[in-house]
Image (cartoon, rainbow, N blue to C red):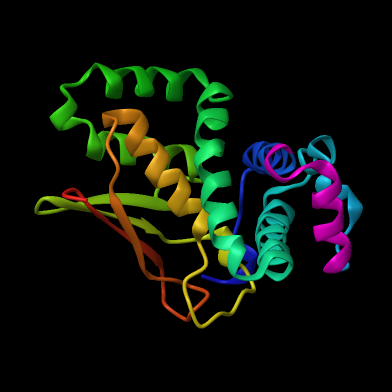
Amino acid sequence: MTVSEVLFSPRLLRQFVETLSFEIGSQNLSAVLEKDNLPAEWSSSAQVNRFDGKRAAEVYAGLQSAMRTYYGHGARGTLLRIGGKLWERLLNDAALGVRAQSALVRGLPVSMRCKPALDLLARVLSYKPGDITAHTLDLDFLLVDHVSPATLEQKNSMPICYVTQGLIREALYWAVSREFDIEETSCRAVGHNNCEFKITAGG
């Protein structure tokens, strides 16, 4: 997939910026942007909501990169937490179809909710159908992000999709009130074709 094909929803970006600002504080967010010489408008949810899909993907990746630069090793925990907090915002701001699907997930027996919850997350995060897919691996699960806007123009020796990990964790906890072991086993920033997250049901 070429860079020009990596797209991200401006609406999701707005929710991410609002969550980021709330969790670390608007002054800290300004400092994060300043350290990486990034535009101040990136801290404005109203501004980023006007971006097109391509620009939104660039900003989504750029903000997370700036967070990793500013916080160093501490960025992982912060971005995981932000991903977790983002899930509730995305559900509350979701279109009617997504809300109906979320009600269906919660209406299932608990033992049957995990895969549908991951399907719901994939639908919420995908710019277009198929961008993200969920799969069953015996008793475990796999979420595959085929586009991964967070890795746009990013190169790293380790997987970097902490926000997505936080979203997965919170979506599953929302569905079944249980913690899971979640590992990013491949990442486009490392040079892999997709970002893949193995979810161990016995965690």
> Closer to the camera, 70 or 100?
70
Please indicate, yes or no, whether residue 127 appears anywhere in the rendered image.
no
Q: Residue at x 24, y 37 (%)?
A: 114
| Front in this rendered view, residue 83 or 25 | 25
Q: How many labels were placed on the picture? A: 0
Q: Where is residue 143 in the image (x, y as percent from the top left)?
A: 33, 54
Q: How far across and down, in percent of the image, does residue 53 sit?
A: 67, 49
Classify residue 156 as left or right of residue 123: right
Q: For residue 25: magenta?
A: yes
Extreme residue in the left direction: 138
What's the magenta region? 22-36
Overall secondary structure of the magenta section: helix
Which residue sits at x=62%, y=70%? 3
**Rendering quarter of residue 2:** bottom right
Magenta includes 93? no
Q: Is 94 left, or right, of 99 in this rendering?
A: right
From where the camera sits, is residue 177 visible? yes
Q: In this picture, is 78 found above or below 4?
A: above
Q: Which residue is drawn at 61% across and 50% down?
A: 8
Q: Where is residue 198 in the image (x, y as percent from the top left)?
A: 28, 59
Q: Is residue 23 left or right of residue 177?
A: right
Give the residue drawn at x 28%, y 47%. 180
Q: Is residue 145 left or right of residue 153?
A: left
Residue 30, compared with residue 96, is above or below; it is: below
Q: In the image, residue 137 lies at what x, y percent? A: 15, 56
